Image: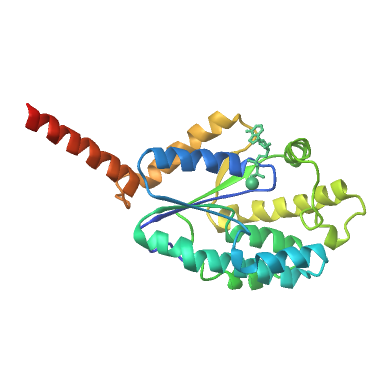
Amino acid sequence: MLHPQPYHGKLIIVEGIDGSGKSTQIDLLVKWLTAQGRTVYFSEWNSSELVKSTTRLAKKEKLFTPTTFSLLQATDFADRWENYMLPMLKAGAVVLADRYAFTAFARDVARGVDPLWVRNLYSFAPQPDLALYFRVPLEVAISRILSARAKIKYYEAGMDLGLSEDKVESFTLFQKRIMEEYERMIEEFNFTVINGTQPIQAQQKQIRALVRRVLNGWEGLPNPMAAAGKNKKRQKKQKTREVA
Ligand SMILES: Nc1ncnc2c1ncn2[C@@H]1O[C@H](COP(=O)(O)OP(=O)(O)O)[C@@H](O)[C@H]1O
Ligand SMILES: [Mg+2]
């Protein structure tokens, strides 16, 4: 178990295999919360500038072992966590993450890394206030990926594991392993399971209700832009009053 999240802000994350609909839903959530005047901070897996060039080179040259891949992605996450997500949480923002430590727990273990070792590696990361797990049958996710994208990449397909010479077959076998790890984590990390085969709007409706429950009665950091808008309105009112 990860330690509970002790900060003033709220931490909401999405997990699931590629093509399960995570990014679609979290994008809609960010827009909805921002429109409400909330201060929202969004972070995406594998997006830190700190290790970007190393990751790119190692992927290109196929230099990664499961351990070095895991360590570099943990560095990416630690950089984003310590410099952005944690300060925003402390300040009282709603921090939203497209993939969290659970992605490492699923993918690295699917690559043969020891489950306890990788959990210890991320022991600085707290348990989110809401962890949404998008569950879809493998075939649904794969057909979405194949129709949305031209090519599946080498590591994404788990080609480094030597499961199959065929990329789509390797991807399918690798995603299956990842999915099994996610399924095992539902209880361990208190995932809320979302049926990812539902239409986009139906899922978003359900997710907003869950988020509303998490934010109920909580005063976060007001969005300075929204506050500026309110002040302008107030000033306008004041002026109207003075004129009258
Ligand atoms: N509920 C849904 N029904 C049908 N297609 C969807 C649904 N949600 C997402 N998609 C489509 O599936 C593809 C993958 O979705 P995405 O949100 O990028 O998944 P993920 O971030 O989990 O990889 C995209 O082309 C997206 O438009
Ligand atoms: Mg995505």
Q: Quadrant of the C terminus?
A: top left
Of all residues shown, which one is farthest toward the top?
A: 244
- Residue 103 visible in the snapshot: yes
Q: Which residue is located at x 48 percent, y 56 percent?
A: 128
Q: Which residue is located at x 71 percent, y 69 percent?
A: 54
Instruction: Give whichever of 104, 152 is nearer the camera.
Output: 152
Of all residues shown, which one is farthest toward the right?
A: 165
Instruction: Give whichever of 140, 182 is nearer the camera.
Output: 140
Instruction: Give whichever of 223, 160 is nearer the camera.
Output: 223
Q: Position of residue 208 (x, y in %)?
A: 45, 37
Q: Quadrant of residue 102?
A: bottom right
Q: Which residue is located at x 78 percent, y 69 percent?
A: 64
- Residue 2 visible in the snapshot: no
Left or right of 214, for residue 123: right
Q: Position of residue 160 (x, y in %)?
A: 84, 62
Quick check: 176 above or below 125?
above
Total marks drawn?
A: 0
Left or right of 237, for residue 22: right
Q: Which residue is located at x 28 percent, y 44 percent?
A: 228
Quick check: 46 above or below 217?
below
Q: Position of residue 127 (x, y in %)?
A: 49, 60
Q: Position of residue 51 (x, y in %)?
A: 64, 68
Q: How is the image coloured?
A: rainbow
Quadrant of the rendered image holding ligand 1:
top right
